[in-house]
Amino acid sequence: MTITVRRWLQIAAALATLALGFYVLRPSPISVDIGLVESRPFYEAVEAQGRTRAIDPYIVTAPIAGRLLRTDLDVGDRVVTGEVVARIAPTPQDPRTLAFAQANLAAVEARYSAAEAALEEAAGALARANRELDRREELFANSLTSAEETGLYRQLAMSEQARTRHAEASLRAAEADIESARSFFLGVGPSESPDETSIVNISSPVTGTVYSNPEKNERVIPAGTPLLEISNQDNLEAIVDLLTQDAVNVEEGATVYISGWGGDSIINGVVDYVEPEAFTKVSALGVEEQRVNVVIGLLDPPVNLGSEYRIEVSIVTWQANEVLTIPTSAIFQRSNGWNTFVVSDGVVAIEPVIIGQRTRDYTRVIGGLREGDQVVLYPSDLISEGVSVNY
């Protein structure tokens, strides 16, 4: 009897030792993050980075070549329609060129004096010819002279009239030459400083904000040089370039959500149009890609959003109000397709899942899971079938 009790005590001690060893050596549960399979409004979108830009900005250019005078306008300054935004003095000349121009002016003024004298002479000859013609016609009417002699004086008067018209034309040409020669001196005063009467003032064509001012300092510029870029009432739009295979799914009027601009709010937008022609762009990896610009209208831009700001754009291509979804970070691919780890009573089981549209945050579930299922987010290599987890 004593031996039997002792034996049972030994067996109980061995079992206790085994239980303690199992408890000590058993694998501890792995800590994981858990997500839910649930219904939610869902949309599929094309996502890309873009920028804002001014709608139809006005580029103010130099109408003439000359010396651009320094302006006090800075980028960000407000201007109104008609306000002077730039001033240009005609190009100053070197002394040799000025001396040549002065000699040319003296020559054309002398030609003007000669043309003026020739006109006076022709006008006097015409007056004499007309008086003589009147007298000869009166004599012919009284039969005191012949028709041939009267016709000769009539022809002489016509010749003098033609010579007078020629002299008048020569005088007008000389006047034009003088104006041309004098125009060379516009903008050059006695000390080769700009003449205020010759300075060309350039006005703003629109009310808005100065977005760029590449020619702030004084220098000589050719005609057509861009001077300022002015917004059109500070209206903004967004532009993003998409791969052509993504852009074919974008329709005019599609909803756009804009983030990543620096604020916490989401800016709503709508696709205005997709440009008809694509272009080639080399990616950061050196791969040539065909891309196309998508222009987006901003519905509620914040006041602190400016032109050329970087933004993140989500262009909706499909949406529904109630869709069964799973966090995108909970699914992974194996040879049999898409799978996820479902947690039930603290134990992991791998489940195949049939998915539809995907976004960065959520994926549409078509089959394999039920609403309310708990799934492991960001599963590591430690997670496998039958592993215990806590969360």
Image (cartoon, grey):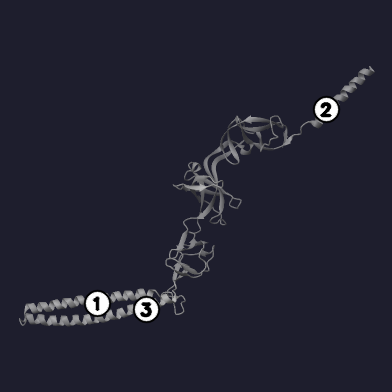
Tell me the kind of residue under disc 2.
Answer: Ala
Residue 347 in percent (x, y) is at: 71, 31
Where residue 103 is drawn, which disc sits there? Answer: 3
Residue ranking furthest to the top: 1
Q: What residue type is labelled 1?
A: Ala
Q: Position of residue 126 (x, y in %)?
A: 19, 80
Number of the label disc, if any, that sits on residue 167: 1
The residue shown at (12%, 79%) is: 153
93 sits left or right of 156 in the view: right
Q: Distance between the residues labelled 3 and 1?
A: 24 Å
Q: Is mark 1 on a helix, strand or loop?
A: helix
Q: In this view, does 318 lie to the left or right of 130?
A: right
User: Where is mark 2, residue-wise?
Assistant: 19
- Residue 106: percent from left, percent from top: 35, 80
Mark 1, other Cα within 10 Å: few <14 / some 14–19 / many ≥20: many
Vertically, is 287 above or below 85? Answer: above
Disc 3 + disc 1, Cβ < 8 Å:
no
Q: Which numbered disc flags the more N-terminal residue, 2 or 3?
A: 2
Three-letter code for the amino acid on which mark 3 is drawn: Ala
Q: In this view, does 173 lie above or below 312?
A: below
